Image (spheres, grey):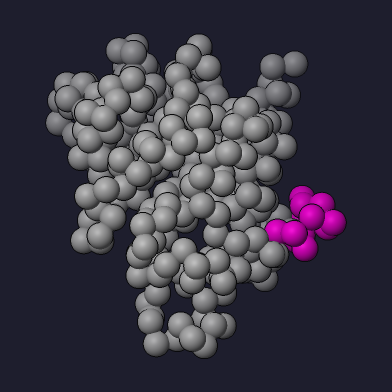
């Protein structure tokens, strides 16, 4: 299973793929994370109107697709992902926004090879099956974040569907499941108690944290970096909890957290953190 691949701590997780050097949650981001020598990558999954599983972070399509250019969809604003079918989503471009906006300044700084930019600009929204297949072929483990589908038709079925996709693509032993919706973790634990789980948390920690994680069947804890310090990490790591804070883009802070005992840090800059860790070990 997932954690058996990682016997220690101090690992690099590529947030939504290497999203500082490729359009997030796309095949290009997956490949960029592999090339950056991240240890594993994190992706987001949610359901379409017709029940397909797609890799996409936001609730709405406007930030990371070109949906505003598709006149047939203009009357469906604000364009919730869950209101579109998979065939409709396949009409959208999910890479051109990255090239146009250069959100992390990496294109301007020359950190991305010019010859791969055209391919990035043509990226679409991938299905979960497609990225799991690709991850398996690359022997690249995955942290699947199940997005909260509350108030959408996918709410009652997404956990089982994600599990079925893992089984179908033979990636069950490569996957860590996380979610802000902790009921999803409970459901996954009932489906298969051996699938490793991690609770995502922001703003504040649950009361009696260790007992709470045990009640979920979770051995991983993914808190917002803003609500932890190194002493907190040391305490939880000493209790056997695998702590992976998000989204850690300050490399000094990332290294301090890893030295304190974090299982991993989730970062937009896996390429930078890997270089830093490699230089430090020499």
Provide residue 73's location: percent of width, then percent of height: 46, 82
Is residue 109 in the magenta section? yes
Q: Residue at left 51%, top 52%?
A: 127
Of the pair 100 and 138, the residue shown nearer to us: 138
Q: Residue at left 29%, top 25%?
A: 192
Is residue 192 in the magenta section? no
Magenta segment boundaries in residue numbering: 108-120
Provide residue 111's location: percent of width, then percent of height: 77, 50
On screen, residue 100 versus residue 259, left or right, reads: right
Determine which quarter of the picture holds residue 217: top left
Of the pair 237 and 131, the residue shown nearer to us: 131
Of the pair 212 and 125, the residue shown nearer to us: 125
On screen, residue 163 versus residue 211, left or right, reads: right
Circle count: 0
On screen, residue 170 versus residue 59, left or right, reads: right
Which quarter of the rendering shows the N terminus? top left
Of the pair 101 and 260, the residue shown nearer to us: 101
Question: In the rendered image of this protein, does residue 189 appear above or below residue 236?
Answer: below
* Residue 272 visible at all: no
Provide residue 224's location: percent of width, then percent of height: 36, 41
Which quarter of the rendering shows the C terminus? top right
Question: In the rendered image of this protein, does residue 129 appear above or below residue 90?
Answer: above
Question: In the rendered image of this protein, does residue 193 appear above or below residue 246?
Answer: above
């Amino acid at each position: 299973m997932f954690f058996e691949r990682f016997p220690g701590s101090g690992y690099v997780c590529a947030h939504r793929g290497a999203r500082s050097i490729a359009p997030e949650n796309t095949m290009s981001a997956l490949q960029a994370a592999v090339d950056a020598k991240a240890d594993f990558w994190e992706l987001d999954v949610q359901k379409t109107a017709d029940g397909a599983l797609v890799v996409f972070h936001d609730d709405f399509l406007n930030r990371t697709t070109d949906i505003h250019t598709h006149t047939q969809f203009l009357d469906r604003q604000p364009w919730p992902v869950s209101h579109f079918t998979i065939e409709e989503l396949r009409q959208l471009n999910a890479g051109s926004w990255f090239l146009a906006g250069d959100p992390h300044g990496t294109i301007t700084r020359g950190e991305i090879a010019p010859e791969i930019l055209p391919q990035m600009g043509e990226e679409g929204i991938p299905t979960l099956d497609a990225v799991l297949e690709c991850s398996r072929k690359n022997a690249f483990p995955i942290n699947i974040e199940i997005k909260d589908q509350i108030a959408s038709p996918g709410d009652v079925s997404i956990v089982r569907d994600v599990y079925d996709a893992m089984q179908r693509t033979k990636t069950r032993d490569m996957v860590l499941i996380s979610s802000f919706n902790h009921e999803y973790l409970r459901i996954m634990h009932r489906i298969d108690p051996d699938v490793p789980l991690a609770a995502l948390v922001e703003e504040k920690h649950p009361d009696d944290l260790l007992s709470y994680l045990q009640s979920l069947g979770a051995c991983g804890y993914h808190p917002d970096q803003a609500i932890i310090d190194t002493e907190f990490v040391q305490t939880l790591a000493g209790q056997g909890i695998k702590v992976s804070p998000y989204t850690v883009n300050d490399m000094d802070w990332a290294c301090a957290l890893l030295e304190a005992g974090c299982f991993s840090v989730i970062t937009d800059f896996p390429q930078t953190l890997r270089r830093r860790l490699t230089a430090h070990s020499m």
